Amino acid sequence: MVKQNNLEKRTAIVIGAGFAGLSAACHLAKEGFSVTILEKNNQAGGRARKFITNGFTFDMGPSWYWMPDVFESFFNSFGKKVSDYYQLERLSPSYRVFFSDNDHVDVPADLDGLYNLFEATEKGAGNKLRDFLKEAAYKYDVGINDLVYKPGESISEFIDKRVLSGVFRLHIFQSFHDYVRKYFSNPKLIQLLEFPVLFLGAQPKDIPALYSLMNYADMSLGTWYPKGGMHKIVEGMVSLAKELGVQIKLSETVSKINTESRRVASVTTDKGSYVCDVLVGGADYHHVEQHLLEKDSRSYTPEYWDKRKLAPSCVIFYLGVNKQLDNLLHHNLFFDTNFDIHSKDIYDKPKWPDNPLFYVSAPSKTDSTVAPEGCENLFILIPVAPGLIDTVEVRESLFEKVIARMEKKTGERIKENIVYRKDYAFTDFVKDYNAFKGNAYGLSNTLWQTANLKPKLKSKKLKNLYFTGQLTVPGPGVPPALISGKVAATQIIKDFN
C-alpha cells in the first residue's frame, strides 16, 4: 500500500492527532514518508475524543455526521471503505427544532417529506425548496470537489474555467441572509436554512451565499450516525494510520520547534527530541506558530492574530440521566429564543448570552451502547463568543437556564434525574488543545477569511513547515479537517518532488 519511491526515507513529524493531523499523516505515509504523530493528550482525536464514566460513553466534541462522501473519499484514497472501519445509520427524522411558540418541527430525512413540510408552512415553498437545493447542489459540487482542495497559496488557483464560468451562480459576493430571503419569507423556514451556517462562525449576513452548499449537505445528503459514536471515526483513522506504518505517540507534548538555515531541524518534547525532514502543525495554528517557534521564524505577528475573526467557542454539558426522555430525538435544536440577539452576543458585542439558543444531542436515542439501560446520554452545547472570562458561576447560570427551558419544552423532569454531569468551556479548550482564545470551531468563514485569505498552510519563513486544521484552509468542521490534511500532504509531496 505504501509507495516505494524517492520519498521513502523522508521523515515527517505531525504535531496533533486530530482529524487533520491523522489525515495528513496517512496521506504522507502512503507516499513513502516515515511519519510520527506527537499528541499531547492520552488519546487521539483532538476535539473528537471520548470519555467513559458510570456506564456512559460521551463523545466530547463533534456530533453531526454530514457529507458522508468526504469520509468515503478519504478511506477510498487508501483502497478502503468507511464500512471497513465503522457502520453508518441514517437518522430519520434528521433532527428536531423547538420554536418559541411551543411548537416543534421534525425535519424529514427524505426530500419529498421536506418539500411537503415547506409547502405546508408557506405556500409555494415546496417548489422553491427544489430550486434552492438544485442551486445548492451545484455549489456543493464546485465547492467540495474543487474549491476546498486548493492550498490557498495564491489567488491564481481560482482562475479555473468551472469556477470562473459559474462565479455568479456560486453567489460568492451575496450574503447568505439575503439569498435565503429571496426564496422564503416564513421565519421558521428561514431558521431551518440558516442554522447550519452557525457552524461556520458568523452571522448569516456575513457569510457568502456559496455556503448554501451546507443546506445540500444537510437536506440532500442526510444526517448520519457512526454506530458506537463519533469516536469510531477516530478509531478507524488510527487503525488505518497504523496499517500505513504511522507511529502515534500519545501523552507527549511538543515544547519547542528547533530551526536551522530557514528550516525546521527538530522538535523538542517533554520526553525527548525528533529530527525531521518536514514538520506538519496539526495542533492549534496560533499555538504552534506563536509559542513553539522563535519570533524570527513566525509568519504572522500577534497583531495579525488579534485581528482574526473567530468562530464561536462553546459551553458544553455532558449529562447522564437515569430515565428515558420521550420528547427528544438524537439531534435537537432549541430555537425558542431570539436568534438575532444571541448572534449579536457572539459576534457584534461579545458577552455571555442571557437567553441562548442551544443544541442537545441524545445519542442514546439511536445507540443503546452509550448509556446504561433505561438511561439517556445528553450532550448540551451553547455557542458563545470566544475570549470571555470563564467562571463557575457563569457556567452554572447557563446550565440552570437551559435545563429549565428543556423541561418546559419537552414537558419532562430532567434536572432531578441527572446522575452524572461534566462541564466543558473556554479554559478546558485552552488547557486541552491550546485553542486560540478558547475557540471551538476555528476561524469564521467570512468572505475576507476564505481560501487564500486564511493563514497559509505553508510557512513563509521556514521551507519545511506546513500547517493543517481548522485555522487554515479549507476551514472548520470534520469533513474540512479531513480535506485539510490531504491538501497539506499534497503540497508537501509536490514541494519535495
Image (cartoon, rainbow, N blue to C red):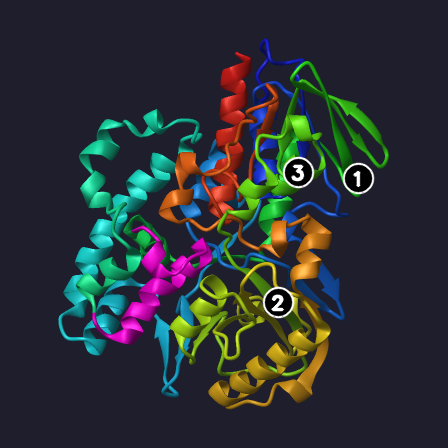
Nearest to N terminus: mark 1 or mark 3: 1
- The reply to whether discs 3 and 2 touch (Cβ–Cβ < 8 Å) is no
Q: Is residue 120 on the magenta stretch?
A: no
Q: Residues within 10 Å of mark 1 (few under 14, many from 20)?
A: many
Relative vertical location of residue 5 with respect to residue 103 in this rendering, above or below: above
Position of 454 with respect to 47 (left or right) is: left
Residue at the disc numbered 2: 316
Specify the amino acid type for callout 2.
Answer: Ile
Q: How far apart are the two marked residues, 3 and 2, measured between alpha carbons? A: 27 Å
Relative vertical location of residue 16 with respect to residue 215 in this rendering, above or below: above
Which stretch is magenta?
Answer: 185-208
Q: Tell us which disc is closer to us: 3 or 2.
A: 3
Q: Position of residue 93 (x, y in %)?
A: 39, 69
Q: How far apart are the two marked residues, 1 and 3, measured between alpha carbons? A: 19 Å
Residue at the disc numbered 1: 252
Residue at the disc numbered 3: 290
Q: Secondary structure at mark 2?
A: strand
Nearest to N terminus: mark 2 or mark 1: 1
Taking the spot 33% from the left edge, 25% from the top edge, the residue there is 156
